[in-house]
Image (cartoon, rainbow, N blue to C red):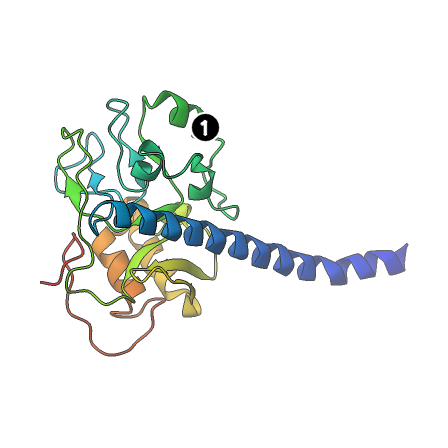
Amino acid sequence: MAVIAVLIGLISPTLGHIQDAARKVVCASNLRQIGLTLSMYRDDHDGFFPAARAEPGRAADQVDPQLAHTGEHPDSWSGFGWLVGTGYLSTPQVFYCPAHTGDITSEAYADAWMMLDQPIRTNYAYRAELVPSGDILDRPQSFAEARSPSSILASDAFSNINEINHASGFNTLSLGLDVAWRPDTNGRFQTIIAAAGAGGISPDTGWTLLDGDGDGPGGSGPEQPSVNRFGYHR
């Protein structure tokens, strides 16, 4: 029995690492599927990606990058939600990371996706231009103008420390629709998020860090042009 206990003690950390690695792979696969679907949407909408709306109760110029539906009426899709609302995806399961340990899960939002009567959020952040919350039309946005294909279009959520999917980094989807793992070296990004408290960090800050402008997962590199909240160069 003692030998078995020792073996279990030796194997358990390895199994934990294997499970973490498997969840990262599934998460990356989710973003890859989202990227392929965004590509189809863009091809069918003259080179435009889905737009986003502000959640009820938020300032008109504040977009929640994880919001998929505002809950105001059945057609009030936002961001990734347009992919379901316009029939490009048949299930929203792909919007939820298996490594997430917080409250934003596919099970928690299963009824909301059916009823469309409350705000729906996902485990991934989407970089989108804001559309007025009262506009029920599918008004796409061009994110590609004057931006590098390596700029981040979507990623693991980063707005609040409780919404992070992985402890060691972030899966990202670039404008060129490439999926990559961005390690959070020494936990710098998470330290910034944690220091922001319950309110978390702004989307601008998150995208800047992921793009590599400063001490974030993107690392240091050539100086990048500044970016406004809609993803265009200033």
Q: Quadrant of residue 77?
A: top left
Image location of residue 74, percent across then percent down: 28, 23
Q: Give the residue at the far bottom of this rendering.
A: 222
**Relative side of 210 to 133, left or right:** right
Determine which residue is flagged by label 1.
110
Name the residue rendered at 82%, 61% in the picture.
Answer: 6
Characterize the local packing of mark 1: few (<14), some (14-19) or many (20 or more) Cα atoms within 10 angstroms: few
Q: Residue at x 26, y 45 (%)?
A: 44
Residue type at mark 1? Ala
The relative height of residue 196 versus residue 115 in the rendered view (above or below) is below
Number of callouts in the render?
1
Q: Along the horizontal axis of the image, is 88 left or right of 10? A: left
Q: Residue furthest left?
A: 234
The quadrant in which residue 7 appears is bottom right
Q: Does residue 135 show up?
A: yes
Q: Give coordinates of residue 90: x percent, y percent.
A: 43, 34
In percent of width and height, residue 131 lies at: 15, 39
